[in-house]
Image (cartoon, rainbow, N blue to C red):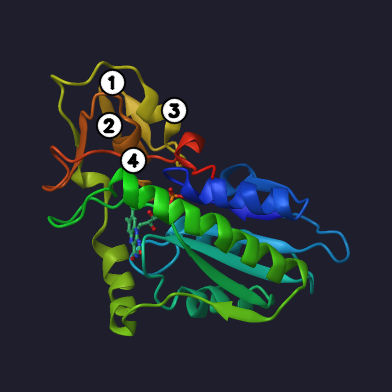
Amino acid sequence: MIFYFSGTGNSQWVAEELAHKLSDRATPIMAAKSDYSPAAGEKIGFVFPIYAWDAPACMYQFISQLNLNCDNYIYMVATCHSQAGGVDKVFKKALAQKGLALNAAFSVNMPNNYLLAPFLKIDSEAKRSKILRQAQSRLNEIAAAVEAEKNIISIKRGLSILSKIAPLFRRFSSDKSFYVEKAKCIQCGLCAKICPMKNISLTPFPEWNGNCAMCQACLHHCPTEAIQCGHFTKGKKRYFFKKEYLPHD
Ligand SMILES: Cc1cc2nc3c(=O)[nH]c(=O)nc-3n(C[C@H](O)[C@H](O)[C@H](O)COP(=O)(O)O)c2cc1C
């Protein structure tokens, strides 16, 4: 079983691709049972995006409620734009608190969805294709390692000092930064439908209710780009994963 969380679809695609390659199943954590009983020999995977060099808080919440009770092979795959920091170390500790071991950890670079800083934007079409081409072969490597139940840490960490920012990011990130430009909003309700945390109510304009993963799904899926977050998202192009972006050659 592969448990996944995804905001803009990168991690969902990775989870589903791995499930396909490993003849496994992928389930979003929001729909997963916390008392899942794996079969003997079944591999357990966790796939999620990197937020500030760590896993999303909702992933740790899911693990804290998990009642797996097994010594099956366990692996994690973090999708990130470039650097996953020390996520495997924190993830390993979270699993250890539930009596579970982490056998393998991987990162895979995927297109960027983080726009909340002045210098950050989505990738150009050419860069996106290149990243996805590399991701396709990276997933073959990951699937082969998992299939062979390798004990391996294969994470692109970046500067280790950056991992120290994750707790600060947690403390200061909140959905209070999201707002809607009412003149652009067509009240289609897609933001509320797409939100994996079910954190958006429509009155009829979107309102965020304090249980946000900061995944940016609402912002990137809004068909009129009416949703903004903080000071740096206006005028920037949006991104969410589409199968048609995958290079086929
Ligand atoms: C709040 C937030 C923080 C992020 N932090 C990082 C980061 O520290 N390092 C990185 O390489 N990518 C970072 N990203 C980019 C995402 O990890 C990356 O685009 C990921 O594949 C998105 O997955 P998803 O489409 O499944 O939501 C961040 C994205 C968001 C929304």
Q: Position of residue 189 (x, y in %)?
A: 36, 21
Q: Mark 3 or mark 4: name the one nearer the start of the chain.
A: 3
Residue 10 visible, this orientation: yes
Q: Quadrant of ligand 1?
A: bottom left
For residue 92, above or below residue 229:
below
Q: Which residue is drawn at 72% across and 78% down?
A: 150
- Confirm if mark 4 falls within 8 A of ligand 1: no
Please give the residue where the numbered disc 4 appears in the rendered image.
239
Please give the residue where the numbered disc 3 appears in the rendered image.
193
Please give the residue where the numbered disc 2 appears in the rendered image.
207
Q: Which of 39 and 197 is in front in this view?
A: 39
Q: Where is residue 129 in the image (x, y as percent from the top left)?
A: 41, 48
Q: Position of residue 125 (x, y in %)?
A: 32, 43
Q: Mark 2 or mark 3: name the one nearer the start of the chain.
A: 3
Q: Mark 2 or mark 4: name the one nearer the start of the chain.
A: 2
Q: Residue at x 34, y 83 (%)?
A: 160
The CA span between labels 3 and 4 is 17 Å
Amino acid type, mark 2 = Glu
Q: What element carries label 1?
A: loop
For residue 85, above or below residue 223:
below
Report the quarter where the N terminus lies. bottom right
